[in-house]
C-alpha cells in the first residue's frame, strides 16, 4: 500500500465522477451513468494493458479500482440530482488524475522494457483513452481532440518521464516532477485558452 | 454437444437478427448489415475474453458462432426487405439470449477463479457489450443506457448466479434458475415500463 | 527488410493521410488529427492481433509503423492547410493499401493455423477496422457500410488468398495476384458506382 497506489485509485474515482456528470446531460439512467463512469475511469489503463498484452487487465486483477469507480459514480449521481455543481469544479482534480495516469502508463511500459516512443505513447493512451471512450458512448466527437492543450500536456510529461528515467533519476522523484509539469501545462492552457493550431481541410 | 452450447449458438443468432434490423434503419448495405450483426452477436463475449485474457477469443477458436451469426443475418436481411416485422417480434428471444449470455459470462469467470464482483461484471459485459457496439456503429447513444431495466436485470441475475454457485448449487440448476429470473425481470420491466431513475445533471 | 514490409509501412502511412484529411473536416486540432491518423493506420492490425492473441500488438513490437503514421499525418496536416487537394487524390493508394492489409491479415492467420473462414475474416478485419474506428472517432456512421463495394472487395480477395494458398501456390505469387484482384474490383466499383443492395427495414 504505497502513495502512488492510493493516488491511482483516487484518479480512477475522479474520472468516474466527471464522466457521471457528462452522462447526466444525456439523460441516461443510473445504470448507464455507472457504466460510463466505470469505463471512463478504467478505460485508459485497459487499452494500455490490451496493447501491451498484460492480461487479465489491471482492474480484473485488482477489483479495488472497480469498487472505487462505482462508489464515486453512485455518490455523484445522487449528489448531482440535488445540487448545482460549477462546471469547472473538477478541472484541478481532473488535471491531477490525467498527470498521474500519464506517469503510471509510461512507467509500466518502461519497466516492461519497451522503447521510449512506445512508453510515451502508453502514457498518453492511459491518460486519454478513458475520456475518448466516454465521449464515444455519449455520441460526441471526443473532447480532447478539440479542447485546450490536454493530451499534448500528457505527451510532454511522458517524454520528460522517459528522459528523466534514462538519466538515472529515481522513479519517485521523476514521477513527482512530471506530475507537476503536466498539471502546470494543463492549468496554464485552461487559464489562457491556449490551443494547438486547428486544421480546416480545404479538400473538396 | 450439450444443451447450453446449442442455446449459446441460438443466442448469438438472435442478437445478429435484431442488430440486422436496427442496421437496416440506417440504410446500410448488405455487408454493413452483416458486420453489425456479427459484431453484435459475438461482441459481448469478445470483450469478456479480451479483459480476462482468454485468447484467441471464443469465436476465433470455434467458428460455429461466426457461421450462426452470418447465416441468421443474411436470412433476416432478405426477409426484412419483403415483409413488415412488428417491432416487438424479438423481445422474448432477445430477453432469453441476454439471460443466457449473462449465465455464460458469469460462469466462465467463476470457473477461472475470479472474485464475485469480477464474475458478475463479466456476466453483464457478455450480455450487453454486443448491443453497445451495435449502437456505436449505428451512431446512436447505446439504447441500454436509456431503456427499461435491461442491464440491471442482467446484473441481478449475475449476482444470483454467484450466490447460488457459492452455496453449492449445481451449475445446471443455477443456470436455469438465473435465466428464469432474468427473463421474468426483463419482461416485467417491458410490460409495465419500469425504469431506473434518470439523472438530469444540473451542472452549468 | 523485404518488399512486403516496405509496402505495409507505406499502407499505414496512406491510411494515416486519408484519415488526417477526414479529421480536418471536423476542425480537430493537430493532436486530434495525429491520433485519428495513427489509429486509422494501425487500427485494423491492432484488432486482428487482439482477436488472435498476438500480443503485444504489432506496432508496439515494431515502432516503425508508429513513426510512419505520425510522420505522414504531420506532413499532410501542414500541406492540407495550404493547398486544395482533390477528394479522389488518394483513391488509388487507398485501394492498394486496403488490398495489402487484406493479404497480410489473411496470411498471418493462415500461418498461425486458423481455418479458412477465420483467416478470411482476419483479412477483412485488418483491411477495414482502421477506417471504422476513424469514422467512430469522427462521429460518423462508418463509411464502409454505405460506400461502393469496399469491404466486399477485401472479402473476395481474402477468400481467393485462402484458395490459392490451399492449392499450393507460393505466398508471394498468391499475394500479388490477390492484390491485383482487389484493386481491380475496388476501382471498378468506384468507376461505375457499383453498390451492394441496401436494406430499408420495414419494421415499425
Image (cartoon, coloured by chain):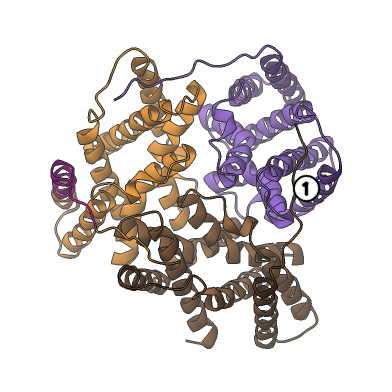
Chain colours: A brown, B orange, C purple
For residue B191: magenta?
Answer: yes
Percent position of residue A131, x then y: 53, 60
Percent position of residue A119, x then y: 69, 66
Q: Chain of mark 1?
A: C
Residue that mark 1 sits on: C73
What residue is rendered at 39% in x and 70% in y? A63
Q: Secondary structure at mark 1?
A: helix
Determine whether C125 is above or below A27 in the image.
above
Foreground: B150 or C161?
Answer: B150
Percent position of residue A49, x then y: 55, 61
Looking at the image, residue A103 sits to the left or right of residue B65; the answer is right
Can I make out residue A113 in this image? no
Residue extent of the magenta highlight: B181-196
What residue is rendered at 76% in x and 48% in y? C69
Determine whether B199 is above or below A99 in the image.
above
Determine whether A96 is above or below C155 in the image.
below
Q: Quadrant of the C terminus of chain A?
A: top right
Percent position of residue B45, x then y: 39, 46
Looking at the image, residue A34 sits to the left or right of residue A41; the answer is left
Image quarter of residue B26: top left
Determine whether C58 is above or below C122 in the image.
below
Image quarter of residue B200: bottom left
For residue B163: magenta?
Answer: no
Q: Main secondary structure of the magenta part?
A: helix
- Number of marks drawn: 1
Please rate how many residues cluster around mark 1, counting C-alpha atoms within 10 Å: few if below 14, some from 14 to 19, many from 20: many
Foreground: A25 or B96?
Answer: A25
Can I make out residue B77 in this image? yes
What residue is rendered at 83% in x and 40% in y? C6
Amino acid at each position: 500500500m504505497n502513495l502512488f497506489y492510493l493516488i491511482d485509485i483516487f484518479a480512477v474515482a475522479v474520472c468516474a465522477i466527471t464522466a457521471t456528470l457528462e452522462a447526466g446531460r444525456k439523460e441516461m439512467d443510473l445504470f448507464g451513468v455507472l457504466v460510463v463512469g466505470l469505463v471512463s475511469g478504467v478505460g485508459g489503463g485497459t487499452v494500455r494493458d490490451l496493447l501491451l498484452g498484460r492480461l487479465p487487465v489491471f482492474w480484473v486483477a485488482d477489483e479495488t479500482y472497480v469498487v472505487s469507480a462505482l462508489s464515486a459514480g453512485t455518490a455523484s449521481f445522487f449528489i448531482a440530482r440535488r445540487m448545482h455543481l460549477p462546471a469547472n469544479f473538477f478541472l484541478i482534480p481532473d488535471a491531477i488524475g490525467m498527470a498521474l495516469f500519464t506517469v503510471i502508463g509510461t512507467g509500466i511500459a518502461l519497466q516492461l522494457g519497451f522503447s521510449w516512443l512506445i512508453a510515451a505513447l502508453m502514457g498518453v493512451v492511459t491518460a486519454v483513452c478513458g475520456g475518448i471512450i466516454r465521449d464515444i458512448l455519449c455520441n460526441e466527437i471526443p473532447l480532447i481532440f478539440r479542447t485546450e492543450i490536454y493530451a499534448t500536456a500528457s505527451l510532454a510529461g511522458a517524454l520528460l518521464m522517459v528522459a528523466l528515467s534514462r538519466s538515472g533519476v529515481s522513479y519517485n522523484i521523476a514521477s513527482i516532477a512530471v506530475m507537476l509539469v503536466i498539471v502546470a501545462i494543463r492549468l496554464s492552457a485552461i487559464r489562457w485558452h491556449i490551443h494547438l493550431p486547428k486544421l480546416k481541410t480545404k479538400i473538396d
